[in-house]
Image (spheres, rainbow, N blue to C red):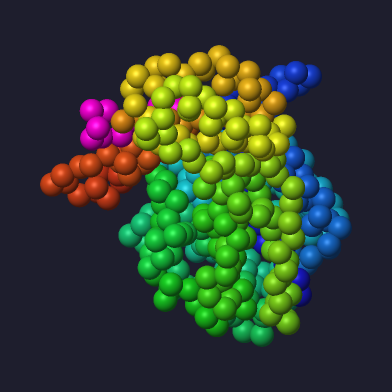
Amino acid sequence: MRIAHVSDTHLGYSAFGRVDEQSGLNLREMDFYRAFEECVDKVIQLKPDALLHSGDLFDSVRPSNRALSFTLDQFARVSQVGIPVVVIAGNHSTPKLRETGSVFKVFEHLKDVHPVYKGEYESIELGGLMVHALPHCEGEVLQREAEKMRPSGSHLNAGMMHVGIASIQEFRMGEFNELMLPVSALNEKLDYIALGHYHGYVHVTRNATYSGSTERLSFSEARDKKGFVMVDLAKGKKEFVPLHPRPMLDLPPIDAKRMDADELRRELKNKIESHELDGKLVRLIVRNVTSPVYRAIDHAWLRSATAKAMHFDARFEVVQEGVSLQSASTYIDSLEKEFVSFLDHYPVEKVDKERLRSKGLEYLQRGLEESD
């Protein structure tokens, strides 16, 4: 019994405002479609007994018609060759307001596609495989529902969850609606647990693995390999199947302390010319820039020098009165990520920063849902 485990495809994601000249589509949106289509191509070629998608299929609660149509086509391709699909809702796919409804309901009409999105544990029997699926749910019921994921009879048993691991800070994504479980909640008697949420490929326990995302969503993932996992449940073997996302390059930072404007320009020129930027997503952080030097930067020259990159994000950490740091960037991320980044870098005294982060993300998400 072999399964393909994929996660965090974030279909419909878009960024940077760059569009394809022929189609008019956002280039990053196309990248995410392309990565998932490559994944489906390889799954069909490898012919597993099931495809498990462990959450964040879409990047938002209300994906566009284009994202939904594309996804239906890809799932239909898998179904048509006799590979059943189980897909659970992750935090990006679960509305905070119940009346919003779930787009996952449309998958119920596809043959051999089993969506799990109602905020509680469900089991799906696929021949000799029992899938124990836990979608994103209310935080207070998470532990209770996770305890229902127990091996069943003579079947091989695979679990599915979209959570971070509370005891391991690395597996937090700093996102709204994020769910956390202690590592002790991962049932070691299951043959495999397909984890979603964390975007890197990593084995958490003997039987629990994050497959990671299929494309890179931030520069913290610049060095991560992207793909999915093929698992032989009977033999306990796991194989990572790589995909080919758009290259991302996080350049070594520049320390501009004691540099004047001319010296900084020369350093920027050397840094840019020493790397191949064509078609890549590139970030360069420049630290300790004084206000006069920052004001003297020729941003038109910088844009011209980096024009071959698909996107170039220059972040200047500007020294204000020799004390605080202010980040001036050519790129603004999503509201949620910018808010988390702001909290991470801004000193807040006599306040529970974790609670502030949680409430702030909740209010932002509620406002975004209500404005849709």
Q: Is residue 296 left or right of residue 280?
A: left
Quarter containing the N terminus: bottom right
Q: Is residue 292 visible?
A: yes
Residue 170: give x, y in percent of width and height.
Answer: 44, 60
Residues in magenta, as a range: 320-330
Q: Position of residue 251 (x, y in %)?
A: 57, 41
Residue 48 position within the rendered picture, expressed as x and y whole percent measured from the top left: 79, 65
Left or right placement of residue 91 versus residue 76 in this view: left
Is 207 drawn above or below residue 323 in the view shown?
below
Nearest to the observer: residue 86 or residue 27: 27
Residue 81, percent from left and from top = 86, 56
Magenta stretch holds residue 122: no
Residue 327 located within the stretch drawn in magenta: yes
Question: Dividing the picture into quarters, in which one does residue 308 lie?
Answer: top right
Residue at screen point 63% across, 22% down: 305
Query: Overall secondary structure of the magenta stretch?
Result: strand
Please indicate, yes or no, whether residue 102 appears anywhere in the rendered image.
Answer: no
Q: What residue is drawn where x is 61% and y is 42%?
A: 249
Q: Is residue 9 above or below residue 312?
A: below
Residue situated furthest left in the rendering: 350
Residue toward you, 246 or 261: 261
At x 57%, y 78%, the residue is 206
